[in-house]
Image (cartoon, rainbow, N blue to C red):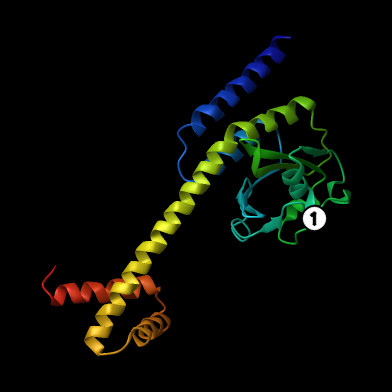
Amino acid sequence: MSAVLNHEDLDIHLLHEVGSHMASADALHDVLARVVEFAVALVKCDSCFVYVLEGDELVLRASKNPHAEVVDRLKLHVGQGITGWVAEHLKPVAVSQKASADPRFKFFNELPEDAYEAFLSVPLLSGGRVVGVLNVQNRQQHVYSRKQIQLISTIGFLVGAEIELARLEGENLHLSDQLKTRKLVERAKGILQRELGVNEEQAYLALQRQSRQKRKSMKEIAEAIVLSDEIKRGAV
């Protein structure tokens, strides 16, 4: 009896850790790495994936096993596969054996986990809306207990808001960087127009040409032009 209680205490401790760690989470990938860490600690599994909803697509953003070739690249639509079904219906799915035989299953050649027997998928929610899906898988047949499903689902409730916040912050940073790059390119175009006596379109094409030839981004080329101009003008 004491062993059961100790195990329950451990589960409660882990869930408390999830909540406290998520409260001080940083970038999206850091948040998702912790989600995987806690899920694996709560439910013994051979694989763990976290998909994040972006637009109408679920993007694979984190994995227990190394999958550098598919993380941040593999996508599926809401409603597609078991993962997409969970995102659409906001309900967990637990398959104890022959997961690939489930009519909702979608096979990906890039994922060896698709040959695994057991599959548990739960929604990650924020304000009643799905923001992602957490999957755990086992190579051999595995009956996920009601308690395991509840524990993983609880993670989904605890981390959903933090995942959404981290994703939005990441988008804002990306938009901010795009704006800075646009302003830098505009400044570089103005310098080229003045120095070369060309129009705006010709200046932009010159930037593009330099970017291709030197195999550097437009931002890097623009930075070099602006820096050179500041040096000539004695601003540095």
The residue at which mark 1 appears reads as: 106
View extreme (left): residue:
234
**Rendered image quadrant of residue 3:** top right
Q: Residues within 10 Å of mark 1 (few under 14, many from 20)?
A: some
Number of numbered labels in the structure image: 1
* Type of amino acid under label 1: Lys
**Rendered image quadrant of residue 44:** top right
* Between 33 and 154, the one nearer to me in the picture: 154
Is 144 situated above or below 232? above
Q: Residue at x 52, y 47 (%)?
A: 167
User: Horizontal and vertical percent for residue 155?
Assistant: 63, 32
User: Horizontal and vertical percent for residue 225?
Assistant: 26, 76
Q: Residue at x 66, y 59 (%)?
A: 74
Q: What is the quadrant of the N terminus in the image?
A: top right
Secondary structure under the numbered disc 1 in the rendered image: loop
Q: Is residue 130 left or right of residue 32?
A: right
User: Horizontal and vertical percent for residue 196?
Assistant: 25, 89
View extreme (front): residue:
199
Is 210 situated above or below 40? below
Residue 41 visible = no
Q: Is residue 143 left or right of residue 10?
A: right
Residue 44 visible = yes
Is 102 situated above or below 108? above
User: Horizontal and vertical percent for residue 115?
Assistant: 80, 52
Q: Is residue 202 left or right of residue 38?
A: left
Q: What is the quadrant of the C terminus in the image?
A: bottom left
**Rendered image quadrant of residue 92:** top right
Q: Residue at x 79, y 57 (%)?
A: 107
View extreme (top): residue:
1
